[in-house]
């Protein structure tokens, strides 16, 4: 497989995701009858020269329409990003995710800008916020971000982050808050620094001329004194004036402006009496029954109302008044004005309380069938139908526990009364999901055992999905505690059930991606590398098809570790780099699923002799890891690195720490053999080959780690002055087509044995074989550590013998400090390349285009171009070819 061949460009969002974005990010449509507000436009133009503008007034003051009209006029401040808020945006993940998406939908993001890839939801909130601030700062021109209905935000975490953003606002940021009450933000400080513009209800109040214009647009001609009367009665309140227009156009003839009066309660009563009661019976029934949903399309409206003319009714209601609003350019989704919806929902609860749960239940089922699992769960919670909620969670939402939507999912599950968690297996699994979100893996098993014991009480059609969910929820705690056998058993059971005939499960593919990734992980740790690779590649295909990022990252990370362990360093780098790029671009670091990706990068850098990068990657791996197996493997890699540079005491201390910390854990085959090899390498580094010889038994099988163990034995015999014993081992390995992971060391040890036996020609031939095996993957480290005295002499001798591999030998001599490349400056670049730049650099010697590199690394083409520009600057070159040549001179690239 080519380097990173499994990588793909991100797939477009699913239709359900597009629909949700349309409702959140669409700028409200301004009716053709809207009265232009030049004064408001001037105030907004002036305000958006500053970091923040607050448009604060009560309900119905026309904040949204006035600002939308101004935005449609093409303001000079910059492009306008519109974000309509609701209660769900008190979830920090939801708020920042939609905000970033809104910016990307309206603004051309410069290449290299963090906003191009940022996906808040996983990893560190601090890192997400840092990337957001950096992205806003890096925009080329100001961007206006309108946050509509800001008063619904009350979550302290969201408000504190916004306050922090405004403490030192990015120069390109222009916030416009539309709110019914002053926001809990540091307005006093912004006033003092003149960074705040304020537009309040006196500014929004209709003038006499505007009232006359609005009424004229409705076909109503009034005298100036009558318009003044309406201004006095409504205090210029735009919604009140609009209601007055409805009042004057009502069914009762002879109404005059003097007859119209009211306060908030009167307006509510008027909405009921004039907007609701004056509709025909079928429209009244339609309004009441559809009020249970915040947003509607024709399909949902028809399900709720039993009315096949749902779209026709919505269009009629929108055209007849401003209280039903179409969303997006295609007008597929609608929402009711909050005042109208509140009135309708209250009336439904009073007049037909017995109908309300059934309507919420219908909405839940419709959302479930149409790919909106979170909205389905929310409606089931509104219906207090906890059994339905449990079934929906099991069948199509459980995988969201490992997604950026997990916080919102947990908030919905938290609505289930705790005493009901024992009311059936599905609800017990909901409890397990809450425990998983809280990180209480040790408590999950009790809920899983309960669900398993009650599985027979479920209906036949629910039994298999519930069984699959039980096995899937068994995976995280088993991985955390390092029970690889349990992971393999649960993942195998889930895969088998998911492949069964007649399974009806909406999220089957998403669950399959997770199960395959876990099964491949367990097979890897168990030492069954060929089976693990096949399973992981299958899991990668399904994860990409289902857009399940976390499962994809997990699979890429373990494919990287598997390839690194098998000696396929370039492929390992490609897989691991894709995983790390996806995590870092989305602001998800640290992320447990990426720990093995950092470990794989560390192993590759170690073999490439990039020791600083190896240490850095191990540090990232240690920070991210939350599972016993990966944590142990990271410790072994650290010990091996320490031993390789002569820090024997540190290496032994690391192994001692692992033994003490995981004293009760029985390592699986892969790690057990890795441990034995690491112990032997430490013995050899300490000058104790006798102890190294005692580390290995005689395994009957010849699995992949076997060759590495035999290499350690050969090294030990050679160190003890027994080259003939070493040659016996090496001869067997050479005859059996040595494993790729050990081939370089086998030929290097053959070189050293032949040199010890004064077989110079055979030594030269073996060294050439070692160089030939090492060059494609860039393996360097064994040449520097196996025999620091004899190998440099042999390489220098090889320089004068003229074989084809002298270029790579030159590079090794440079690493050994014995040679400097002709024409190369004495030192490294004044400004070192970053890890991300080094990742891109590795692809430059290939024939891949920038777009193909972007696809492999799961980033945008502009991001790749930005990295290339910085690489050229740091290496002081003008072309890709020159960059490759210069990087090779500096030892940053292998031949």
Image (cartoon, rainbow, N blue to C red):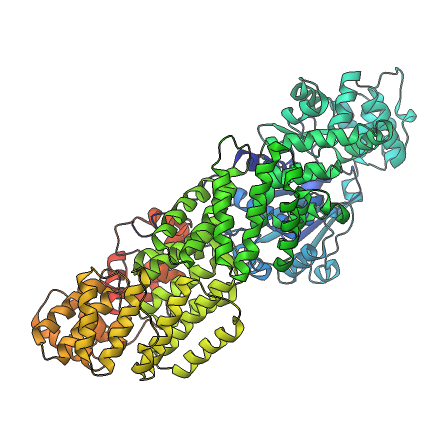
The one nearer the camera, 631 or 278, is: 631
**Quadrant position of residue 692:** bottom left
Pick the front one: 439 or 683: 683
Residue nearest the observer in this picture, 180 or 748:
748
Residue 329 at what x, y percent from top left? 58, 30
Q: Residue at x 44, y 43 (%)?
A: 544
- Please state the total of marks drawn on the protein image: 0
Where residue 742 appears, as percent x and y from the top left, is 26, 65
**Residue 108 visible here:** no
Image quadrant occupied by the C terminus: bottom left
User: What is the x, y in percent for residue 794?
Assistant: 15, 77
**Residue 382 figure quarter:** top right
In the rendered image, residue 81, in percent from the top left (x then y), is placed at: 59, 44
* Residue at 59% across, 44% down: 398
Left or right side of 851 for 255 = right
543 vs 764, left or right, is right
Question: Does residue 666 appear anywhere in the picture?
Answer: yes
Please tell me whether residue 370 is drawn above or below residue 706 in the rendered image.
above
Residue located 47% across and 78% down the image: 656
């Amino acid at each position: 497989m080519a380097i990173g061949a499994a990588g793909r460009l991100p797939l477009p969002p699913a239709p359900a995701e597009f629909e949700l974005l349309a409702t959140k990010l669409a700028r409200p449509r301004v009716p053709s009858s809207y009265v232009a507000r030049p004064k408001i436009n001037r105030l907004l133009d002036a305000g958006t020269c500053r970091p923040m503008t607050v448009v604060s007034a009560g309900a119905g003051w026309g904040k949204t329409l006035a600002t939308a009209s101004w935005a449609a006029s093409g303001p000079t401040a910059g492009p306008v990003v519109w974000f309509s808020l609701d209660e769900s945006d008190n979830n920090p993940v939801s708020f920042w995710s939609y905000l970033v998406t809104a910016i990307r939908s309206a603004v051309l993001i410069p290449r290299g800008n963090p906003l191009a890839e940022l996906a808040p939801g996983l990893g560190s909130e601090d890192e997400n916020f840092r990337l957001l601030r950096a992205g806003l700062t890096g925009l080329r021109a100001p961007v206006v971000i309108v946050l509509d209905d800001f008063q619904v935000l009350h979550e302290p975490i969201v408000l504190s982050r916004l306050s922090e953003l405004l403490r030192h606002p990015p120069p390109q940021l222009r916030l416009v808050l539309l709110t019914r009450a002053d926001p809990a933000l540091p307005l006093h400080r912004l006033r003092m620094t003149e960074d705040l513009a304020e537009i309040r209800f006196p500014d929004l109040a209709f003038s006499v001329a505007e009232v006359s214009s609005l009424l004229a647009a409705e076909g109503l001609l009034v005298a100036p004194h009558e318009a003044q009367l309406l201004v006095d009665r409504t205090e210029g309140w735009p919604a009140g004036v609009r209601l007055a227009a409805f009042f004057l156009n009502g069914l009762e003839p002879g109404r005059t402006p003097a007859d119209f009066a009211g306060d908030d309660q009167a307006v509510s009563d008027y909405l009921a009496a004039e907007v609701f009661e004056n509709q025909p019976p079928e429209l009244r029934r339609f309004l009441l029954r559809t009020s249970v949903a915040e947003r509607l399309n024709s399909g949902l409206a028809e399900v709720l109302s039993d009315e096949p003319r749902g779209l026709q009714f919505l269009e009629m209601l929108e055209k007849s008044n401003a209280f039903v609003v179409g969303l997006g350019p295609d007008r597929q989704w609608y929402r009711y004005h909050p005042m109208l919806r509140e009135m309708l929902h209250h009336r439904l609860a009073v007049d037909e309380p017995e109908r309300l749960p059934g309507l919420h239940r219908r909405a839940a089922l419709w959302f479930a069938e149409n790919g909106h699992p979170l909205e389905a769960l929310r409606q089931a919670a509104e219906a207090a139908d906890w059994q339905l909620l449990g079934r929906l969670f099991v069948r199509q939402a459980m995988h969201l526990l490992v997604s950026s939507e997990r916080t919102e999912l947990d908030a919905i599950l938290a609505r289930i009364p705790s005493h009901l968690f024992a009311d059936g297996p599905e609800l017990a699994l909901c409890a397990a999901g809450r425990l998983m979100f809280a990180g209480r893996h040790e408590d999950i098993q009790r809920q899983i055992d309960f669900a398993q014991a009650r599985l027979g009480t479920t209906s036949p059609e629910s039994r298999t999905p519930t069984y699959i969910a039980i096995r899937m929820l068994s995976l995280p705690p088993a991985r955390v505690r390092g029970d690889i056998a349990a992971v393999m058993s649960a993942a195998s059971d889930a895969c088998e059930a998911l492949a069964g005939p007649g399974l009806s499960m909406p999220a089957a593919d998403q669950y399959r991606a997770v199960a395959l990734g876990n099964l491949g992980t367990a097979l890897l740790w168990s030492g069954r590398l060929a089976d693990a690779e096949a399973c992981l590649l299958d899991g990668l295909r399904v994860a990409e098809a289902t857009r399940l990022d976390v499962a994809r990252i997990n699979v890429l990370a373990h494919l990287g570790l598997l390839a690194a362990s098998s000696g396929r360093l370039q492929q390992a780098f490609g897989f691991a780099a894709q995983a790390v790029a996806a995590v870092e671009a989305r602001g998800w670091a640290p992320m447990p699923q990426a720990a093995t990706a950092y470990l794989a990068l560390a192993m590759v850098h170690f073999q490439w002799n990039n020791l600083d990068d190896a240490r850095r990657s191990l540090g990232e791996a240690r920070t991210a890891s939350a599972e016993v197996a990966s944590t142990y493997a990271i410790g072994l890699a650290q010990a091996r690195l320490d031993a390789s540079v002569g820090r024997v005491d540190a290496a032994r201390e690391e192994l001692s720490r692992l033994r003490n910390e995981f004293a009760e854990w029985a390592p699986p085959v892969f790690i057990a053999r890795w441990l034995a090899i690491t112990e032997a390498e430490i013995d050899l580094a300490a000058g104790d080959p006798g102890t190294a010889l005692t580390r290995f038994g005689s395994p009957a099988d010849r699995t992949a780690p076997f060759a590495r163990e035999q290499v350690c034995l050969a090294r030990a015999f050679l160190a003890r002055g027994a080259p003939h014993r070493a040659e016996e081992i090496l001869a067997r390995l050479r005859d059996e087509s040595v494993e790729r992971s050990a081939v370089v060391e086998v030929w290097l040890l053959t070189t050293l044995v032949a040199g010890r036996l004064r077989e110079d020609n055979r030594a030269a031939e073996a060294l050439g074989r070692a160089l030939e095996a090492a060059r494609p993957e860039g393996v360097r480290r064994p040449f520097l550590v196996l025999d620091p005295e004899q190998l440099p002499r042999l390489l220098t001798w090889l320089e004068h013998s003229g074989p084809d591999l002298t270029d790579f030998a030159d590079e090794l001599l440079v690493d050994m400090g014995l040679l400097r490349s002709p024409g190369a400056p004495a030192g490294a670049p004044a400004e070192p390349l970053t890890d991300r730049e080094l990742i891109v650099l590795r692809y430059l010697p290939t024939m891949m285009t920038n777009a193909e590199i972007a696809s492999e690394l799961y980033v945008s083409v502009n991001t790749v171009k930005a990295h290339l520009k910085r690489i050229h600057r740091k290496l002081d070159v003008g072309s890709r070819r020159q960059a490759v040549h210069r990087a090779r001179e500096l030892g940053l690239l292998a031949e």
